[in-house]
Amino acid sequence: MHPLLTQALGDTLRMVGWSAAVTVAAGLPLGVLLVLTDRGGLLRNLAVNKVLAAVVNLGRSLPFVILMIALMSFTRAVVGTTIGWQAAVVPLSVGAVPFFARLVETSLREVDHGLVEAVQAMGGSTWTVVRKVLLPESLASLVAGATTTVIALIGYSAMAGVVGGGGLGDLALRYGYQRFETGFMWVIVAVLVVLVTLVQLAGDLAARAVARRGRTSAAPRLRLLRTGAAPSSPSAPSTT
Amino acid sequence: MDTPVITTTALRKVYRSRDREITALDGVDLTVREGEVYGVVGRSGAGKSTLIRCVNLLERPTSGTVEVAGRDLTALAGRSDRAPAALRAARAGIGMVFQHFNLLSSRTVQDNVELPLEILGVTRRERAARARDLLDLVGLADKARAYPAQLSGGQKQRVGIARALAGRPRVLLSDEATSALDPETTRSVLELLRDLNRQLGLTVLLITHEMDVVKAVCDSAALMKGGRVVESGTVAELLATPGSELADALFPVGGTASGPDRTVVDLTFHGDSATRPVISRLARTYNVDVSILGAAMETYDGRQIGRMRIELPGRFEDNVVPIGYLREQGLQVDIAPEATAEPVTGEPAAVGK
């Protein structure tokens, strides 16, 4: 494989991997809180809910490139630099956390409220309800949401070149698009397609494995063979 | 048997929405005694579901108190929306089964039964042993490793019952537990509840819209209308109450006089009298031709209770003596007015729904 391509693939994987880890770690509790503090939730607190929702909406409405520039001083404080793939992880995470939190919220809302009541009737606390009902019962859906988020991150990471983050998207942009090496650009795009496809496949398999235990939650079908790359991804990798 | 286990006093629940108030419970006083199966019936919207959910405070009553096993749950609940530890501990001693079973689809049958024990902090080994015992008790020992989606409705409800019993509750609340089941399965689930009531001395409060459920398992019943309990008592007491709607619905008798110059008499059997062949003795002793127009009888503990509508030839004046005989036998005797040719009671479903 072309050394440039290997380097870029490595950068993409590092950026996406780290930011996905941060996103799940932060987005999951945020999504849970969005559900719990809402009207009819177990920790009903509309003030907190409104603030959380506003933060999430703000994070989701800012275009990623602007977010990346705007967060530079924050990025420096967190990772100590504003260039390189490490620097890209911070805005990628900040951009993806609200996105994933909304997906988590949607998944948790689909859990039958009767199950929550059943556990309350047994004497379960709010934490018990989250741990024994909300998360396990929506696991398949959460895995699907995480898959979608990772693919969105692969798309966002194409813009990491702005802060010198490197990665496949950046490589396609600079070598393929700006230097008119169209053939090379298509090779990179092909690598991205394979990457996204593999992520989707892995996510679908994991969601199916989880869903099969319960046999009730709708197991996502394998979308891979029908349409190729990631139809479920809201933002396919943009290389232009 | 006479100690009250569940007592609600002046229970009110008012739902407030933006521009109106809905009174779901309007001063409900209910007493369920230890070891009995108590049925609350009423149409949908009568408040029975709110009532049972107020008993373990899944629903906070607006005012009034709920006592279960001597503890005032409303006092434990405090003011906040969240359930304090004391209330949660009390809830753990109250089992509940639901119309839609509410089993966790991601857990096996055994793990579902173990769930309340996990909350109680029971060790893994004890949990497994207890769950196996309970599954045995409800006849599902072979399904321990299955998932709820692989079970039939009746099996799911058995799992729900096993789960409700895991914490060894004194009280079982049943929220329309058989309403999603077919008649055959309903019968077997009710028999299970009846057996558990007898074997474990479990007190059961159930709500239902089906009169047949009350008829099949309940010792006592209450009828709710518009957020109030309009009638309550043991089945025999209800039968003995003239004009009781519940008794009419439980034991509907129909039939009209076959012609003029006939006397139609409603007999209610609710005591020892029911064990004696009253009707045939009446016919033999007074040499009257008795026709039975309709009857609804059940046998509880070897005693027959129920109602029967019979017709005697001749006007009331001609039948004073035989009617006196029936009264002497300890039966409740009501003379249907001559004009009342149509049945006094509607179908059971009319009240039950």
Image (tube, rainbow, N blue to C red):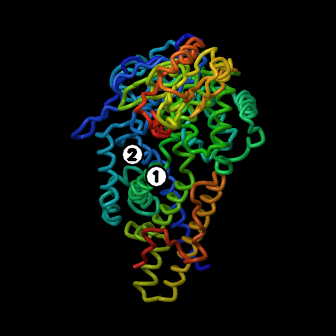
Q: Name the mark on residue A62.
A: none
Residues B285 and A155: in front is B285
- The Cα atoms of the two marked residues, 2 and 1, are separated by 9 Å
Question: Which amino acid lies under the numbered mark 1 shown in the image of this protein?
Answer: Val
Number of marks in the image? 2
Instruction: Say few, some or many: other residues with alpha carbon within 10 Å of mark 1 (under 14 / 14 to 19 / 20 or more).
Output: many
Q: Is residue A91 left or right of residue B87?
A: left
Residue bearing the label numbered 1: A104
User: Which chain is mark 2 on?
Assistant: A
Q: Residue at x 31, y 34 (%)?
A: B15
- Chain label for disc 1: A
Question: Residue at the location (40% across, 84% down)?
Answer: A178
- Say what secondary structure mark 1 lies in: helix
- Front residue of this view, candidates A159 and A226: A226
Q: Nearer the viewer, residue B301 or B279?
A: B279
Residue A128 seen: no
Nearest to N terminus: mark 2 or mark 1 = 2
Instruction: Point out the residue furthest to the left here.
Output: B19
x and y percent of residue B84 in the render?
44, 23
Residue A32 percent coordinates (x, y): 44, 45
In the image, taking residue B342 as reference, residue A229 lies left or right, namely: right
Q: Is residue B84 visible?
A: yes
Q: Which residue is mark 2?
A: A34
The image position of residue B82, as x and y in percent, is 41, 29
The image shows residue B60, relative to residue B285, as above or below, that is: below
The residue that appears at 21% across and 40% down in the rendered structure is B19
Asked if marks 2 and 1 touch (Cβ < 8 Å), the reply is yes
Report the front residue among B159 and A237. Answer: B159
Residue A140, placed above or below residue A190: above
Quadrant hosting residue B280: top right
Give the amino acid at mark 2: Leu
Quadrant housing the C terminus of chain A = bottom left
